[in-house]
Image (spheres, rainbow, N blue to C red):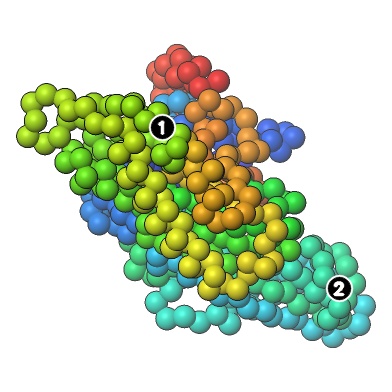
Amino acid sequence: MEKEKIIVAIDIGTSKVTTVVGEIDELGDLHIIGFGEAKSKGIDKGIITNRNETIKSIRESVNLAETTSGFKIVDAIVNVGGQHIEFQNDKEFLTFGVSQKEITHEDIESLHAKVISKVSKENYEIIHALAKRYIIDDENDVLDPEGMIASKLEAEFHIILDKQTSYYNLKRVIEAAGINPVKFVANPVASATSVLYNEEKEMGVILLDIGAGTTDMAIYVEGAIEYTKSIPIGGNQITMDIAHRFKVSKEDAETLKKEYGVAIVEAVEPEETISIYPRGYEEAVEINKSLLVETIEARLLDIFDLIKKELQLTQLLGKVNAGIVITGGVANIPHIKTLAEASFGTDIRIGRPKDYRGFSEKLSFPQYATSIGMLNILRNDNSFSSSLDMKQNSNFFDMLKKFAETVRSWFY
């Protein structure tokens, strides 16, 4: 395989670190050829809290992905997220000395560089300067101005920034884990790339990526991203509510949530019971399952209420006609679509990763939207495709080939 056809994404979240290896075939399609996942330690809501533990989690995830793919991972695209992410919308223009100039790729890059140099926010790092739309000669909106004739080129941008301390702490732990981060992508941008359809973006749509530690939001209007936000609340709050109410460990609470949890009490049989193991009890205790579901439903409604308050502040709801797409690990809770539709009063869709092949039984779940989205961003970004370095070590590969083929068969 040629190295420019291999790309890697590392999703560092509050609950897990996921490494996904992809291959781009001659038709430009994305095939997943390696996967590794490890419990996330030392990071909470996008903030590094224990450097050494985070490094260990990254290495464990990367090592597993190397085993399943048969490649030594050197470079990767990495996500950033958390309450420290901010955005601003801005515009910039270029005027040309001649009235009939053909717009080149270099002109478009110059316009991007101009708006980036204009953005000045102390102690923040620019993650994205996303062109929402281009305007030529003050009147025509175009998606791609390259090759067109104009005397003036203007663009509106959505700029996403990360606090420098958070950005550099994350960058340093990734490098300490032996990985070169070739590009950083904000969580909602990656997830939107993975789960949203162009028609939804054109109609206006809200993306909610509800993970363990944060809820990341993105609003698209007329095909372009207008708003991003991260709220420091997610599935871990549900887990902690269960642990507190039923006096069980966090690990047991997480298991109860995943094995028995649903989003609405009406979906539970009134007499159905489950077994729990409260602290200090030597034997299991039977409780009504509806009590567990009450706890989950109440916290989900709290999360939805916080989101609704944020959405009201955006003043964009009147431009959203395609409803809300929910993704992230919390989107797996059965009946969450029904609860969300009743709470938000609009159409809800559960977003699952698309535009990839392979490992479908493993990766076709909302919690992998960010990982697949990052790979698709790299796939479509020619400026990064040649900078990635994947080393196929013959001794390493020969030793693990048989095991790798076995592991890969689990997911195809």
Quadrant position of residue 277: top left
Identify the residue position indicated by label 2 in the image.
140
Camera-nearest label, 2 or 1:
1
User: Looking at the picture, does residue 301 appear above or below residue 144?
Assistant: above
Residue 306, x across and y down, in percent: 43, 63
Mark 2 vs mark 1, CA separation in Å:
55 Å
Circle 2 — which element?
A: strand
Circle 1 — which element?
A: loop
Identify the residue position indicated by label 1 in the image.
268
Q: Nearer the viewer, residue 124 or 310?
A: 310
Q: Is residue 177 left or right of residue 136?
A: left
Residue 266, x across and y down, in percent: 45, 37
The dot on residue 289 is none
Q: Are marks 2 and 1 in contact (CB under 8 Å)?
A: no
Residue 55, x across and y down, in percent: 29, 47
Question: In the rendered view of the protein, which quadrant contains the N terminus?
Answer: top right
Asked whether the viewer can see residue 162, the reply is yes
Q: Is residue 40 left or right of residue 28?
A: left
Quadrant position of residue 287: top left
User: Looking at the picture, does residue 343 appear above or below residue 399?
Assistant: below
Q: Amino acid at mark 2?
A: Asn
Residue 380, x across and y down, in percent: 67, 49
